Amino acid sequence: MKNKKANLLILLVAIILVLYFTLKDNFSDVVEKLKEANILIFILAILIFLISLFFKAASFKNFINEYHCKYSFKNSYLLTLIGQFLNGITPFSSGGQPFQVYLLKKQGVRITDSTNVMIKDFIAFQMALIIMGIFAILFNFKFNIISNESALSWLIFVGFGINIIVLLFLFFLSCAKKTGKKLVNSFLNFLFKFKFMVKFKEKKEKLLLSLDHFYETSATIKNGKLRLFNGIIYNLIHLVLLYLIPMIIFMALGDYNVTPLESVVATSFVMLIGNFIPIPGATGGIEYSFIKFFGCFSSGALLSGAMLLWRFVTYFLPMVIGAVVLVFKREVKQK
């Protein structure tokens, strides 16, 4: 409970700071831009986001059907929405998966099976994220869409490198079971030498048990490559739609100059950086990144207004929807 309150407090402070620095110089101009927004195009941006979650839910269902063939797409979509809320209020988007495992257990899915589903879905998403990152870097190198002189350019490669390292580490663990277990065990023993980590020592067995679940998952992945491929495709479609939303937001504000390619490349860079910001929702860093990268195509009140609408569509609105679903659909019954 204390952690949740701390996360919410950090999130609230970060949001206040973001709004202050975004609006302090041109508050009235930004408000005027938002008033002039085309409501129908703005609603289209919301619909595109909800459709993108359709493919995220399809990836989830793709993996869960391996263990629970009658699991409905409706429940997959509801769990995806709940994940949007819980990931949004926790650092590194880490809160959604554990609760989704809990809900799946309430729906009759074994914890070991649901844990395997989460791991596979995470791997598929990471691979899709890296593919989109490679696409964005190569196209930017070819067409110089985002200036290499941007202050955040080096962070693109840091974010891309972190995602690559995470994925390579997962593959290393899956291919070298004994060595991987020894490394994890040695690392945990090293951590527990520090006084502030001693209180977590009792969780060591749970961590090692989670590692065993991972090995079980990696074994099934090797025998289910088509399912993994499908998961990657679903996540790629999800990301492409998600990355096109800024373009639609700019259109809603009357700016038709941002092309689909520019929107995909710039948003890909924003997300690569946002992935390693430890504040819930990457709040602060992700807004700053948006302003910097999309500042290559726009400026002033228009840019600030686009950033605020983009964050509303892709972060705050799904958090609200996810919270409502969590409250009213907590005991979703499997058909």
Image (cartoon, helix red, strand yellow):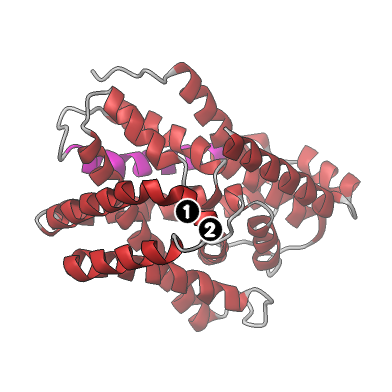
Q: Position of residue 42 (x, y in %)?
A: 62, 39
Q: Position of residue 181 (x, y in %)?
A: 24, 64
**Taking 268 as reference, is 83 above or below it?**
above
Residue picked out by circle 1 = 198
**Element at badge 2?**
helix
Q: Is 226 situated left or right of 269 in this image?
A: left
Q: Position of residue 111 (x, y in %)?
A: 25, 35
**Res. 167 image quadrant:** bottom left
**Element at badge 1?**
helix
Chain part drawn in magenta: 46-65
Q: Residues within 10 Å of mark 2 (few under 14, many from 20)?
A: few
- Can residue 8 be seen in the rendering of this structure? yes
What amino acid is at disc 2?
Lys
Q: Contact, CB < 8 Å: mark 1 with mark 2?
A: yes
- Depth order, front residue of 330/324: 330
Q: Position of residue 62 (x, y in %)?
A: 23, 42
Q: Is 211 situated left or right of 130 in this image?
A: left
Which residue is located at x 25 percent, y 20 percent?
Answer: 334
Which residue is located at x 45 percent, y 32 percent?
Answer: 82
**Res. 107 image quadrant:** top left
C-alpha separation, residue under disc 1 versus residue under disc 2: 5 Å
Residue picked out by circle 2 = 195
Q: How many marks?
A: 2
**Taking 62 as reference, is 274 above or below it?**
below
Magenta: main secondary structure: helix
Which residue is located at x 60 percent, y 53 percent?
Answer: 282
**Taking 225 as reference, is 315 above or below it?**
above
What amino acid is at disc 1?
Val
